[in-house]
Amino acid sequence: MRAVAVIPAERQVRLVEHPEPVVASPTDVKLRMLEVGVCGTDREIVTFQYGSPPQGSEYLVIGHESLAEVVEAGASVTRVRPGDLVVPMVRRPCPHATCAPCRAGRQDFCVTGEFTERGIRGAHGFMTEFVVDDERYMNVVPPGLRDVAVLTEPLTIAEKAVAEVWKVQQRLTWSRTARSGQPPGHGQRAVVLGAGPVGLLGAMLLTDAGFETTVYSRASGPHDKAGLVRSLGAGYVAAETHTIQQLAERIGNIDLVYEATGASRVAFEMLAGLGTNGVFVFTGVPGRKGPVELDTDLIMRNLVLNNQLVFGTVNANRDAYEGAIRHLGSFAARWPQALRRLITSRTPLPEAPTLLTSEPAGIKSVVAIP
Ligand code: BGC
Ligand code: ZN
């Protein structure tokens, strides 16, 4: 069958013939891949800055954001049935008995670093016709979400982040919004840095959670991201017209920053604008571009004197996938057009190598497989 692969030794990205996998264990399921999203991580992999083929393979089949249809289920499979739409998880646990997070099904917190990630690190991905994997990594999607469910995986990043924000903000015992009828972020202000798919999905999730949300980003571009953001009921502030400081002054106390740019300078400038008792979440993985100058005294003073908290988050667990699928359902009901507008192109599989190696355009590019 056909697959899109990265061949590091040859410095190539191309369509390869890859053996069609078979159901080998009673808990295996076979998937027909329907769609695969492309993100910054994929672009790093195809420029050989990140990622690695499985042991013994010269190539890595790329693709980790996906949507598939179950076509066959092993004898003891109970989670899914042929015909179900599913989104498979990305990360697989490390093999070590001593890795408590992996043994607890929380490989997103693996401590040995020997996890694999399908389509990224040490395991083939999803940009191919068929995939076989264990049922435990499958998340069933309602058929009504067929056209947007490929956004599940990028939304899991925000799901995990927000779940952790609720945990850490339990420290603010008086502000628990048990207030009837109000969503948990009610009365709080959030800033989303970046208007790529991770930022825009984050803005949807935060707005849905009741935060007064502002997206801060560079030029809105031909896809009118500003208009898209405003259609959610969130604010849009352009980096061209407002400095970070002006942004912070305009908003007031910033309770949460959700960083989704991978641009470290902007992020740390924003950190200096975080409000009292605020939380700052990093999700971007910047390329190394050399040191920048920062007012570290100011940042440290603010962190201490304002009880601030900073954390990073990578990958996601099953709860985050289930939350993402549920929330895509709410977004589809609340903002049907904005949600569909996040997917700006669908490219057939044979043209995927060109898509992956040309300048990114639009919001989310998707490869349509069958
Ligand atoms: C993926 C995550 C993954 C991370 C690091 C991201 O693009 O969405 O699932 O853990 O890259 O490899
Ligand atoms: Zn990704």
Image: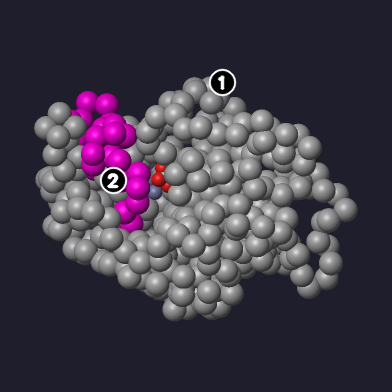
How many numbered discs, if any? 2
The one of 5 and 13 positioned closer to us in this rendering: 13
Where is mark 2, residue-wise? 43
The residue sitting at the right extreme is 174
Tell me the kind of residue under disc 2.
Answer: Arg
| In the image, the residue with mark 1 has its CB under 8 Å from the nearest atom of ligand 1 | no
Horizontally, is 64 left or right of 129 in the view?
right
Q: Nearer the viewer, mark 2 or mark 1?
A: 2
Q: Do the residues under discs 2 and 1 have CB atoms within 8 angstroms?
A: no
The one of 305 and 202 positioned closer to us in this rendering: 305
Residue placed at 56% from the left, 44% from the top? 269
Question: Above or below — where is 270 with respect to 112?
Answer: below
The part of the chain drawn in magenta is 32-61
Give the SS element for disc 2: helix
Residue placed at 65% from the left, 48% from the top? 273
The 10 Å Cα crowd at callout 1, few under 14, some 14 to 19, many 20 or more, is: few
Split into quadrants, the picture shows ligand 1 in the one at top left
Where is mark 1, residue-wise? 98
Tell me the kind of residue under disc 1.
Answer: Thr
Give the SS element for disc 1: loop
Measure the alpha-carbon separation of dots 2 and 1.
34 Å
Q: Position of residue 217 (x, y in %)?
A: 47, 58
Quarter containing the C terminus: bottom left
Residue 354 figure quarter: bottom left
Horizontally, is 243 left or right of 90 in the view?
right
- Of the numbered discs 2 and 1, the one sitting upstream in the chain is 2
Q: Position of residue 232 (x, y in %)?
A: 55, 73
Residue 33 figure quarter: bottom left
